[in-house]
Amino acid sequence: MSDVGNFFAGFWGHVEEFIKRMKIVLAVFVVSLFVMLVLPGNSDFFATTNNYKPLMSVLLVYVGNMFLPQGAQLFANSMSDPITLYAYAAVVFAVGFTLPIFAYEAYKFIDPALHPNERRMIFPFVIISTALFIVGAVFGFFVLAPSFIQGFLPFYAAVNAVQLFPIMDFYNTIFFTVIVSGVIFTIPAFFVLLVKFGILHTKTVTKQRKYIWAGLAIAAMVISPGATPIGDLYLFVALLALVEVSVFVGRIFEKRRGDSNAQPLLSQWFTPQTCKFCHAAIEENQHYCSNCKRFLK
C-alpha cells in the first residue's frame, strides 16, 4: 500500500474511533435529556394520576421557590415561554451531565498519541478543571445567583413597580450565573498550564498585583451590575482567591523546573525591537534608527 493509502487508512481509522466515542457522548446526552423530560420527580409514574410531575418540573419549581423573593411572582411573556423554558432547562441539565463523559471520551481519543509526560499532565488537568468548574457552579448557584436576584429588588421599589419577573429572564439569570461562575473558577487550571509551558510567568502577575486587584474589583461590578454590594464583594473575593491560588500553584511548578527567574515566552514575543547600536526602541521591521541616524542592515 502506498504512503497516500496508509495516510487515508490511518485518517479514517481515527475518524471512526472519534465517531464511536461521540456516539457514546450522544447516547449519554439523549438518556439524560429523556430522564429530565419524562422521568417522574415524585411517586406517580406515566401520568397515572394528576399529581405526576417530571423531574425537570420538580427541579424548576424547587429553583423558583429557592430564588424567588417573597411576594414576587413569575409570569410568561408568551404562551410558548413555559414549554420553551421546560425544554431549555432540560437541555442545560443534560449538557451538564454529559460534559464529564465528553471530557473523558476526548481524553481517551487523544491518549494514544500522547507521550508519557504529556499523559501525566493532561489527565490531572482534565480532572482538576472539571472539579473547579463544579465548585464554581455550586458557588454561583448558592451564593452569586441569590445575590443577583436580590439586587434587582431595590430598583422595583424605586419606581414603585410590582415584583413580577418574566419567567425566561428569571431562569436565564440563574443558569447564566451558574455557568459563568463555573467557567471563571477554572482560571487556576489554565493559568498553571500556561506557567508549566513557560508561556506565562507568575512575576507577570505579582509585579502588577495592585492593578490586577483594582481590575478584579471593576470586573466584579461589571459582571454583576444588578447584584447587591455583598454579592459584588463575594464575587471580588472569589476572583481574588482564584488569582492568588493560581500564582501560588504556578510558583510551585516554577520552583520544580528551577526557572523562577526565566523570561516567559509572552515577554519574548512582545519585547520591542531595539537598535543594535544605541539600543533605542524602533518599530518592527524598521531598517533605520531615527535616534542614532544609522542603518541597521
Image (cartoon, helix red, strand yellow):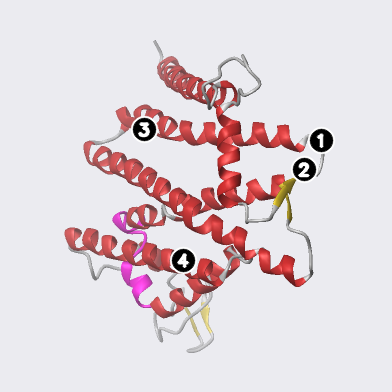
Residue in the picture at 77% in, 42% down: 76
Task: State how far apart marks 2 and 1 are (Cα).
Answer: 7 Å
**Labelled disc at residue 76:** 2
Q: Is residue 277 above or below residue 244?
A: below
Tag in front: 4 or 2 = 2
Residue 90 visible in the current orientation: no
Tag in front: 3 or 4 = 4
Task: State how far apart marks 4 and 1 are (Cα).
Answer: 37 Å
**Labelled disc at residue 79:** 1
Tag in front: 2 or 3 = 2
Task: State how far apart marks 3 and 1 are (Cα).
Answer: 43 Å
Is 223 situated left or right of 252 in this image? right
- Name the quadrant of the N terminus: top left
Residue sitting at the far bottom: 292
What residue is shown with label 3?
Answer: 107
Nearest to N terminus: mark 2 or mark 3: 2
Nearest to N terminus: mark 4 or mark 2: 2
Task: State how far apart marks 3 and 4 are (Cα).
Answer: 34 Å
Residue in the picture at 41% in, 52% down: 186
Tag in front: 3 or 1 = 1
What residue is shown with label 4?
Answer: 234
Q: Position of residue 120 (x, y in %)?
A: 24, 40
Nearest to N terminus: mark 4 or mark 1: 1
Q: Nearer the viewer, residue 23 or 281?
A: 23
Residue in the picture at 46% in, 35% down: 99
Q: Residues within 10 Å of mark 3 (few under 14, many from 20)?
A: some
Helix, strand or loop status at disc 3? helix
